[in-house]
Image (spheres, coloured by chain):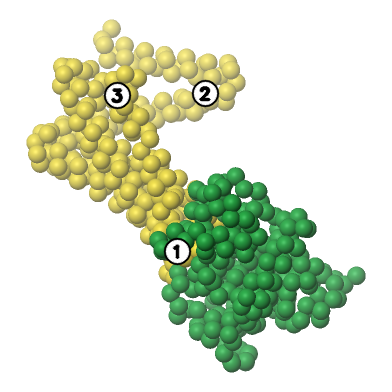
Chain colours: A green, B yellow
Amino acid sequence: MTGAPQERVDGLAVRGLAVGHGERPVLRDVSFDAPKGTVTALVGPSGAGKSTLLRCLNRLLVPHDGSVLLDGEDTAALEPTMLRRRAGLVGQIPVMLPGSVRENLAYGLDPAAAADDAALAEALHAAGLAAAFLDRPAGELSGGERARVALARALTRKPELLLLDEPTAALDAAAARHVGATLRALAHDGLGVVVATHDLAFARELADRVVALRDGSAVTGAPAELLAAGPVGEPPA
Amino acid sequence: MSQPLVQVLASAAFVLAAAWLAYRQRLGLSRSLLTAALRAAVQLAAVGALIALVFKVPVLAIAFVAIMVATASLTAGSRMRALPGSRRIAIGAIALPALSAVGVLLLVGAFDATPRATIPTAGILIGGAMLATTLTGRRLVEDLTAGADEIEARLSLGDRARDALVPLTRRAIAGAMVPLVDQTRSAGLVTLPGTFVGLVLGGASPETAARVQLTVLLTLLLVQLLSALLTAELVTRAATLPGERVAVPGAV
């Protein structure tokens, strides 16, 4: 453990996290807070461990050391399936499950929630798609539409925290701005949003706080301080 | 010339013709055709001698069946090497259904409890179980790797690891059953199955041959389904990590 502050954070708190692939360490002693109602951007060059860090936050990966706290509770002590509903991860590749958009949104929900079309449409709307999409076959959607359905699918679980891996990777500039606005609105509604991105302009516009990963360690700060100097992970021009 | 000698000469002539044809067409296959033929000749001669011995000393039949199970398990296990404990998975998925079915068939008197009846029956059932295990296991290993994103998406939506794997295991089991279902459906129309051919050549009446063949084919349906289900279950266990996580084969 580290000497990081131990006060209870309403939202996500990462303390002294270390993780590796086999013997190779990827992250060491990473600490930051991602409170509810804010957007936190994880930035860094590719291979810096952004996706690995996101997977530690919902325990798809188990860190070697350190802890991840959700509302002050150690996530290691939470039931993993419950944790993953509370901290919804949207992967870099928006995988569509077989069936319609409705079936995707309702996947794994209890029957009452699955049948609640209004709630499904609301999640879709929050992700920037019209309710008419509910009946579309998910396999026929464009990359941008899939990304939004994947976001909406995480929202139908009523998460407290959203973890997004490169949400703008498949999008053009206009669609990326739209997703950015959506995430800001969700944070405004009280969600904690953690976004891994290599898009520094997107991070600068969107984030309240930035966690820059470099050589396995994290530097945290406000976007203006960390991102003004130039691209993270590249030598300043 | 005696018939056995003619059989040997005729088959040798055919394989030489195949090797010559492959050589002329520059297929690079001649050597493997010849070595495969030679291997088959040596193996079958050895098995023939061994089975002749087993017929004289029936207790050796148990050892013989054990060797068949071991060989089948090694073969099927090597097809899913990326998984931890692949050999154990193969032994369980092959031996349990195949040997249980042999036991039931002998117990109810469908076949005589003699080496002459038991060994071929066990051989066919073990072979079928091996096929189902190999097809299911190999497909699962491929899909665990290729479908890692889908599995992760399901886990991230709150699925238990076991539930996240269900679509993969269903696909693998259904796929593994296709060859046998096709074989059963086309039995007698497209091909004459081996048991039937063997019995007729051995002097049995076509009626007897058809009846025995049907018994074997229908038993195989259950044996192979059980092998596929067991493989899926054992692979699911091997791929499931504590904390509702799934291990991708071959990854660290």
**The C terminus of chain B lies in quadrant:** bottom right
Neighbourhood count class around disc 1 (C-alpha, 10 Å): few under 14, some 14–19, many 20 upward: some
Residue placed furthest toward the front: A118
Residue A5: tell me if it is visible. yes
Residue in the image at 49% along x and 73% along y: A83
The residue wearing badge 1 is A113
Q: Chain of mark 1?
A: A
User: Which amino acid, by three-letter code, is at mark 3?
Assistant: Ala
User: Which amino acid, by three-letter code, is at mark 2?
Assistant: Ser
Between circles 2 and 3, the one closer to the viewer is 3
Front residue of A185 and B170: A185
Q: Which mark is drawn over residue B30?
A: 2
User: Which amino acid, by three-letter code, is at mark 1?
Assistant: Ala
**The N terminus of chain B lies in quadrant:** top left
How far is the residue under mark 1 from the one under mark 3?
50 Å
The residue wearing badge 3 is B187
Between circles 1 and 3, the one closer to the viewer is 1
Label 3's element? loop
Between circles 1 and 2, the one closer to the viewer is 1
Neighbourhood count class around disc 3 (C-alpha, 10 Å): few under 14, some 14–19, many 20 upward: some
